[in-house]
Image (tube, rainbow, N blue to C red):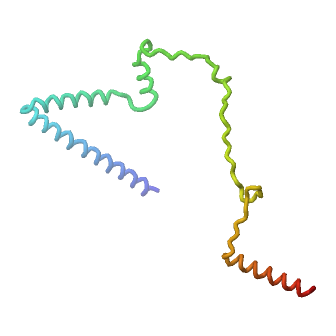
């Protein structure tokens, strides 16, 4: 358990050290860039000023959550956004929907109607076998008589 605690602590320290290293070089590079280039190029100087301005504004904004919602609500003027008027028109609720009933006649294979017919193909081998069997049965019946 002590080893685990020590490992966790070392990991935290390494992460903090990496974050500090990442922050410092980027700041140093920006400062060097600002000093060298800003003097020679006025457009870059304007850009950097705007960038700083918006970074400060971003830092001033609260993080996500209820405080940010409250701030947004307080900033919106109540006079400019009128609440929509609710109409109590319930006439649409009493309307009855009428439509044409276009039912199609669907044929069910299991139902026998006057429109149904039997599909019979004499060349089908199953039908040939049935015919031959029925012929044999008829011959046997005749022979018994």
Q: Is residue 114 left or right of residue 9?
A: right
Q: Position of residue 138 (x, y in %)?
A: 84, 81
For residue 123, above or below residue 31 = below
Residue in the foreground of this view, choosing between 12 and 98: 98
- Report which quarter residue 141 is drawn in: bottom right
Q: Residue at x 47, y 56 (%)?
A: 1
Q: Position of residue 139 (x, y in %)?
A: 84, 85
Residue in the foreground of this view, choosing between 78 and 131: 131
- Report which quarter residue 69 is drawn in: top left
Residue in the foreground of this view, choosing between 117 and 19: 117
For residue 61, above or below residue 124 = above
Q: Residue at x 18, y 31 (%)?
A: 48
Q: Residue at x 66, y 40 (%)?
A: 102
Q: Residue at x 70, y 66 (%)?
A: 119
Q: Position of residue 92 (x, y in %)?
A: 63, 23
Residue in the foreground of this view, choosing between 11 and 89: 89
Q: Position of residue 95 (x, y in %)?
A: 66, 24
Q: Residue furthest left?
A: 40
For residue 68, above or below residue 128 = above
- Report which quarter residue 44 is drawn in: top left
Position of the C terminus, as image quadrant, is bottom right
Q: Residue furthest top?
A: 79
């Amino acid at each position: 358990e002590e080893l685990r605690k020590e490992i966790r602590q070392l990991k935290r320290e390494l992460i903090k050290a990496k974050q500090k290293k990442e922050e410092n070089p980027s700041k140093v590079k920006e400062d060097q860039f600002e000093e060298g280039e800003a003097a020679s190029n006025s457009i870059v100087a304007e850009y950097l000023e705007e960038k700083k301005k918006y970074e400060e504004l971003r830092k001033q904004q609260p993080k996500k959550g209820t405080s940010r919602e409250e701030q947004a609500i307080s900033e919106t003027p109540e006079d400019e956004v009128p609440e929509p008027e609710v109409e109590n028109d319930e006439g649409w609720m009493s309307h009855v929907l009428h439509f044409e009933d276009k039912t199609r006649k669907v044929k069910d294979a299991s139902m026998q109607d006057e429109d149904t017919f039997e599909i019979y193909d004499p060349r089908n081998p199953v039908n040939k076998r049935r015919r031959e069997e029925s012929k044999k049965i008829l011959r046997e019946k005749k022979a018994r008589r």
